[in-house]
Image: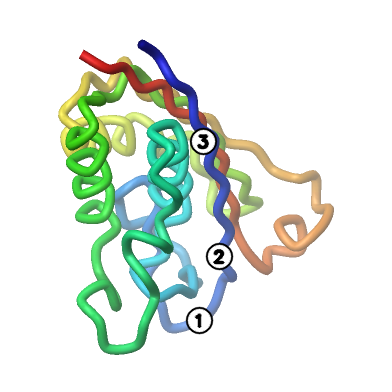
Amino acid sequence: MFRIGFGYDVHKLTEGRELWIGGIRLDHPFGLLGHSDADVLIHAICDAILGAANMRDIGYHFPPKKGNEFENIDSKILLRRTVDLIATKGYTIGNIDATICAEHPKMNPHIPQMQATLASVMGISSDDISIKATTTEKLGFTGREEGISAYAVALIQKH
């Protein structure tokens, strides 16, 4: 049995934070604001995976409460836990297709490293993770460089 899930996430760009996307740190004067490391791509992927398994969303499983175990957590840990969660229902990852929306920094040079990092965390081949990058042609909050968003679709399968 195959199931498909969709995920979306957005975080505001702010000074004084590191920029983590796709499990890697990018050199940029601004980082993303969030309860965890605010890795917008990983959060969208987690929501897609959880949605495919009909297991709600990332905020349900890893609630953003001040002082809890998830505050400032590395999102790669959340992704690994998400894969473990769907395994309790007998599911594994088939593939991921994701898009990052950002004006800066340019994502394309970093995509192979993101794929390798995410594949290692999820225990799948980097060939099963498609990551694309786009801008919004200077339109909206992304175009004004106020934030970064990401979309993801996950295919999971039951064994």
**Does 4 sit above or below residue 72?**
above
Residue at screen point 40% across, 61% down: 60
Residue underneath mark 3: 152
Residue underneath mark 2: 11
Q: Report the mark closest to the observer, 2 or 1.
A: 2
Q: Tag 3 or tag 2, which sits nearer the N-term?
A: 2
Q: In the displayed image of the protein, which residue is found farthest to the bottom?
A: 67
Q: Position of residue 143 (x, y in %)?
A: 76, 56
Q: Position of residue 92 (x, y in %)?
A: 24, 24
Tell me the amino acid under the disc marked 1: Glu
Residue at screen point 29% across, 24% down: 93
Residue at screen point 54% across, 78% down: 14
Q: CA gap, disc 2 to disc 3? A: 15 Å
Q: Residues at badges 2 and 3 in contact (C-beta under 8 Å)?
A: no
**Does 77 sit above or below residue 157?**
below
Residue underneath mark 1: 15
Residue at screen point 23% across, 38% down: 83
Image quarter (top left, top right, bottom left or bottom right) of the C terminus: top left
> 68 or 77, which lies in front?
68
Task: Say few, some or many: other residues with alpha carbon within 10 Å of mark 2 (under 14 / 14 to 19 / 20 or more).
Answer: some
Q: Is residue 142 left or right of residue 45?
A: right
Q: Residues at badges 2 and 1 in contact (C-beta under 8 Å)?
A: no
Q: Which mark is residue 78?
A: none
Tell me the amino acid under the disc marked 3: Ala
